Image: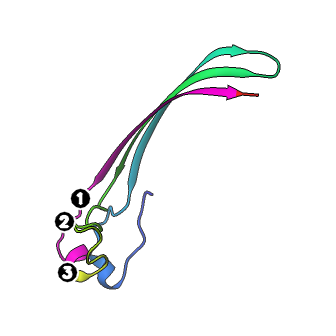
Amino acid sequence: MVHQPIFTGIAQQLPENFDNVLAFDLTDRYWLWGSERTAISLFAEWQWMLNYGVGSVATRSGSGLQGYGTTLNAFGSGNFYNVEVNNFIVGLDFSY
């Protein structure tokens, strides 16, 4: 998302970049064998994602979603941190 909507009420305390996502994906496929009816290939995929300003929804105290959506824990703390994700997948693909 490039631009967030204008929030009202308590949600006005959300940062401007709340839930903006930056993501990259790299995929490769190596064809091993194929015929008119079947094919076998190896594949690998790497994905990186950065989600801005969403970390305060789950509190850092280890208590899970305690206080979710309340002024005290979710918005009042001001601890909006980013969440970064790395995924890597490798496999064998068989088509018939």
Q: Residue at x 53, y 28 (%)?
A: 91
Q: Which residues are magenta?
A: 72-94
Q: Picture coordinates of residue 7 (x, y %)?
A: 37, 77
> Viewed as shown, does residue 92 lie left or right of 1?
right
Q: Residue at x 23, y 59 (%)?
A: 81
How many C-alpha atoms fall within 10 Å of the one at disc 2: few (<14), some, or many (≥20)? some
Q: Are marks 3 and 1 in contact (CB under 8 Å)?
A: no
Mark 1 — residue? 81
Looking at the picture, does residue 49 appear above or below residue 68?
A: above
Amino acid at pointer 3: Leu
Q: Are marks 2 and 3 in contact (CB under 8 Å)?
A: no
Mark 3 — residue? 72
Distance, label 2 to label 1, CA atoms, is: 6 Å
Q: Picture coordinates of residue 26 (x, y %)?
A: 47, 31
Looking at the picture, does residue 5 appear above or below residue 52?
A: below
Looking at the picture, does residue 12 appear above or below residue 55?
A: below
Mark 2 — residue? 79
Total marks drawn?
3
Q: Nearer the viewer, residue 8 or 57?
A: 57
Q: Are marks 2 and 1 in contact (CB under 8 Å)?
A: yes
